[in-house]
Amino acid sequence: MRSELTQAERDFLHEVRFAVLGTTNENGSAHLTVMWYVLEGDEIMLNTAAERRKHENLARDPRASLIVPDGYRFVRVEGTVRANDDPAVAQADIRKLAFRYYQSEERVQRSVDATLAKQHRITYRMPVRRVYSSGF
């Protein structure tokens, strides 16, 4: 395993794909969830609603693993997350993620109005500490 992303892996992660985030449940079992993400420099930015299981898991144990697959090609990164539950930051970050995936300001605004602005959101930043990939 390496500690830095290659340029090919960065290019892959900059493309719009879904990620699967792995955290650890209180009983030690794995908790996996499909996530929006964005690579910002050497960190992965994620955002979730506070009432979700992954938030509980990361509050207890901030270590995480994230895999972004495309068939048999994938990039997996591991790191320790930092949480930011400042409402202004978290809402700005979920809006950024929504635009990345929706590619429509109108659709983003509908989602913000209908759901996202009503939730207590939390942003996580995970510095990339370990990298494993296949197909590059």
Image (cartoon, grey):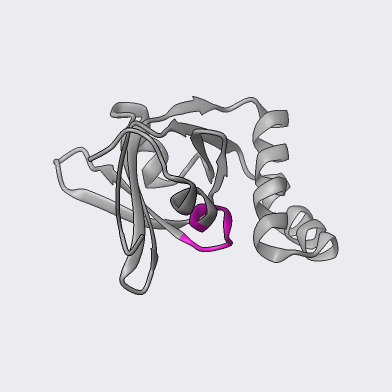
Side of 101 relative to 27 (left or right): right
Q: Is residue 34 magenta?
A: no
Please state, as top left, top right, bottom left or bottom right, where the N terminus lies in the image: top left
The extreme right residue here reads 106
The location of residue 17, given as percent across then percent down, is 52, 63
Question: Residue at position x 33%, y 29% from top?
Answer: 62
Q: Residue at x 68, y 50 (%)?
A: 116
Exactly how many numbered labels are in the figure?
A: 0
In this picture, residue 79 sits left or right of residue 51: left
Residue 121 percent location from the top left of the image: 59, 39
Q: Is residue 98 above or below residue 71?
A: above
Foreground residue, 60 or 133? 133
Residue drawn at (48%, 62%), measured in percent from left and top?
Answer: 18
Q: Is residue 27 above or below residue 8?
A: above
Residue lying furthest left in this view?
Answer: 28
Quarter of the rendering containing residue 75: bottom left
Q: Nearer the viewer, residue 77 or 85?
A: 77
Q: Nearer the viewer, residue 105 or 12?
A: 12
Residue at the spot x=37%, y=45% of the render?
A: 53
Quarter of the rendering containing residue 128: top left
Q: Is residue 100 above or below residue 29?
A: below
- Rendered location of residue 51, percent (x, y): 47, 43
Q: Examine the rendered structure and indicate whether residue 61 appears above or below residue 6.
A: above
Task: Please report the bounds of the magenta region as a residue range.
Answer: 12-18
Where residue 28 appears, as percent x and y from the top left, is 14, 41
| Quadrant of the rendering where the C terminus is positioned | bottom left
